C-alpha cells in the first residue's frame, strides 16, 4: 500500500487523468443528485472486503455511479443553500496539500505552512480593521469556528465573575443567527437570550432593550452578531451591537461565515462598520472566498485569551510549546490534528491577486441587485426585501409549498438550476444564493420565466 509498483503507477495515471478532466470542466455541470439507495448498494456491493480490486475498476464505479449522484456545489447553476466556487488554483493546490500529507498542528512540524496561513489571516484581519496583534487559525467550518470562539467567551466570563460560581452563562443572539450558534450553546451548556427584531436585523437598540427587559445582564457572557445571515444575507448593526457589548463588558463575536467575504467589496464595506471591535470573528473561505471545502478562518482580537483556553496539556506536546513565540494553530481552537486548510487559499490569492477576488465578489453583489430589479418588474413576483449582499428572497404570488417544490424539482431535473425553496416568516418562498462569478443574468431570467 505504500510502495510505487506497476499497479500504483497505473492508479496514479488514472486518478490524475480524472482529476485533470474534472478541473477542465467549464462550466461545471450540476449532475443528478440523489439516487436510489438500492441502486448504489448494487454497484458498490463487494468492494469493501478482505481482497482488493483493480484501481481502475473502483475508480470506474466512482466516476460512473457515485460522482454523478453528488450535486456539484461549484456549478454556476447551483443557487441553493450557500454554494461554492473554488478557483482552479485552489483546487490544484488542495491536491498538493493532500499528496504532501501536511500536518498543520504546530510551528515545529509545519512552519512554512503555518506562516503562509497566517499571511492570509493577517489579510482578513486587516480588512476587518482588527489590531496588528490579532490572529487565529483555520478550522473546518463555521460551526467549528463559532464553537471555538464561544468557548473562549465563556471562559473569559467565568474568570471575570466575582460571584455566582456554577451559574449557567448566556449569550445574546438575534433570531436569525445561524443554527450552529444555537447548537454551540447547547454543547457549552449555555442559554440564549433571543433578541426579537421587526426586520430580522439585530441592532444595538434592540439588544439594549432586550437586556434591560430581561434584567439579568450579569449572566451574559457574550453577544453574537451576524455579518450576512445564511437565509437572507442580512448584515447586523455591528457598530450598534459592539457599542452595547463594550459598555457591558461582553465578548463580541461576529459570525461572518457566509457574508464576511464582503469585507473585500468596496460597494458594501460600510455595512461592516463596527466589526473592528470584534473579540472574535469567523469567515468561511470555502463559501465566498473561492476556496475548497473545508476552510474557515477564525480570528481573535487577543489570541492569548484563546491560547489560554485551547492549549492542550500533554507530555508529548511539551516540545511544541518550548518556544512561546512560535505560532501553533492547535492552540486557537478545540482541534489538535488539522489539515493546513488555509494553504489552497493562500496559493490562489497569490496567483490571482486580491483584486480578482474583489471583482468576483462584486459580480455576485451586482447580480443580486439586477435580479431584485427584474423581480420587481414582473407582476407575478414579489421581492421580499432588498438584498444586503448576494441572497435574494422573493415569492411567486399565489403559490403554495407544493408548487414551489414542483418548480424547483423540474429545474433540477432539466439541469437548469439547483434552487430549492426556502422559508420566510413561516411561508414557503424562493431564494437565490449568488456566489459563482459565472452565474449569468440570462440564467436568472430563464428561472423566473418558469414561474410565469
Image (tube, helix red, strand yellow):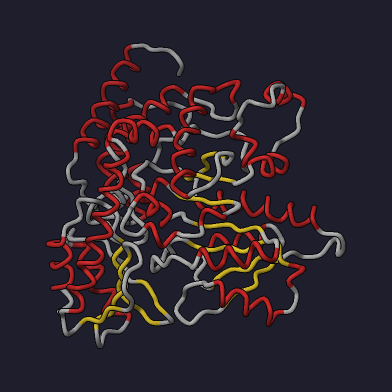
* Nearer to us in this view, 108 or 215: 215
Residue 142: give x, y in percent of width and height.
Answer: 50, 52
20 displayed left or right of 143? left
Does residue 258 appear in the picture of this structure?
Answer: yes
Residue at the (17%, 60%) spot, across then down: 416
Give the left or right position of residue 125, taking residue 186 as reference.
Answer: left
**Lateral position of residue 339 relative to residue 442, left or right:** right
- Residue at 35% in and 29% down: 93
Q: Is residue 178 visible?
A: no
The single residue placed furthest to the bottom in the displayed view is: 398
Pinpoint residue 62: horizontal percent, then vertical percent: 31, 39
Q: Indicate the quadrant where residue 88 lies.
A: top left
Q: Is residue 80 above or below residue 204?
A: above
Work out whether 311 lies above or below 158: above
Number of numbered discs visible in the structure rendering: 0
* Residue drawn at 69 percent across, 44 percent down: 305
Left or right of 255 in this view: 396 = left
x and y, in percent, of residue 136 in the image: 57, 40
Q: Quadrant of the N terminus?
A: top left
Measuring from the top left, give residue 233's x and y in whole percent. 39, 65
Task: Name the image quarter holding the C terminus.
Answer: bottom left
Amino acid at each position: 500500500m505504500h510502495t510505487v509498483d506497476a499497479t500504483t503507477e497505473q492508479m496514479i495515471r488514472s486518478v490524475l487523468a480524472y482529476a485533470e478532466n474534472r478541473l477542465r470542466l467549464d462550466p461545471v455541470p450540476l449532475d443528478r443528485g440523489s439516487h436510489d439507495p438500492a441502486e448504489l448498494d448494487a454497484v458498490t456491493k463487494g468492494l469493501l472486503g478482505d481482497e482488493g480490486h483493480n484501481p481502475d475498476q473502483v475508480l470506474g464505479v466512482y466516476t460512473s455511479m457515485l460522482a454523478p449522484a453528488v450535486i456539484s456545489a461549484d456549478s454556476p447553476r447551483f443557487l441553493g443553500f450557500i454554494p461554492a466556487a473554488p478557483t482552479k488554483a485552489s483546487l490544484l493546490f488542495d491536491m498538493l496539500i493532500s499528496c504532501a500529507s501536511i500536518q498543520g498542528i504546530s510551528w515545529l512540524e509545519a512552519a512554512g505552512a503555518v506562516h503562509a496561513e497566517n499571511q492570509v489571516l493577517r489579510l482578513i484581519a486587516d480588512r476587518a480593521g482588527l489590531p496588528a496583534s490579532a490572529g487565529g487559525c483555520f478550522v473546518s467550518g463555521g460551526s467549528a469556528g463559532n464553537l471555538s470562539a464561544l468557548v473562549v467567551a465563556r471562559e473569559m466570563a467565568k474568570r471575570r465573575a466575582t460571584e455566582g460560581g456554577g451559574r449557567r452563562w448566556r449569550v445574546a443572539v438575534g433570531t436569525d443567527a445561524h443554527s450552529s450558534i444555537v447548537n454551540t450553546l447547547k454543547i457549552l451548556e449555555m442559554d440564549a437570550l433571543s433578541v426579537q427584531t421587526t426586520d430580522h436585523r439585530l441592532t444595538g437598540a434592540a439588544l439594549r432593550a432586550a437586556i434591560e427587559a430581561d434584567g439579568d445582564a450579569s449572566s451574559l457572557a457574550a453577544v453574537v452578531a451576524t455579518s450576512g445571515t445564511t437565509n437572507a444575507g442580512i448584515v447586523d448593526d455591528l457598530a450598534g451591537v459592539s457599542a452595547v457589548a463594550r459598555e457591558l463588558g461582553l465578548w463580541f463575536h461576529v459570525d461572518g461565515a457566509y457574508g464576511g467575504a464582503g469585507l473585500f467589496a468596496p460597494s458594501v464595506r460600510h455595512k461592516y462598520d463596527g466589526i473592528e471591535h470584534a473579540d472574535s470573528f469567523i469567515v468561511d473561505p470555502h463559501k465566498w472566498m473561492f476556496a475548497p471545502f473545508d476552510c474557515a478562518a477564525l480570528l481573535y482580537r487577543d489570541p492569548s485569551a484563546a491560547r489560554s483556553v485551547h492549549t492542550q496539556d500533554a507530555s508529548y506536546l511539551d516540545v511544541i510549546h518550548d518556544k512561546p513565540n512560535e505560532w501553533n494553530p492547535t492552540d486557537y481552537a478545540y482541534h489538535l490534528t488539522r489539515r493546513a486548510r488555509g494553504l489552497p487559499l493562500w496559493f490562489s490569492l497569490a496567483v490571482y491577486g486580491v483584486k480578482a477576488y474583489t471583482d468576483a465578489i462584486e459580480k455576485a453583489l451586482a447580480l443580486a441587485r439586477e435580479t431584485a430589479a427584474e423581480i420587481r418588474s414582473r407582476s407575478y413576483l414579489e421581492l421580499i426585501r432588498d438584498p444586503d449582499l448576494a441572497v435574494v428572497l422573493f415569492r411567486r404570488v399565489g403559490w403554495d409549498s407544493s408548487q414551489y417544490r414542483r418548480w424547483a424539482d423540474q429545474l433540477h431535473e432539466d439541469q437548469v438550476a439547483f434552487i430549492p425553496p426556502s422559508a420566510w416568516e413561516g411561508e414557503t418562498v424562493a431564494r437565490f444564493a449568488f456566489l459563482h462569478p459565472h452565474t449569468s443574468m440570462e440564467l436568472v431570467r430563464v428561472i423566473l420565466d418558469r414561474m410565469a
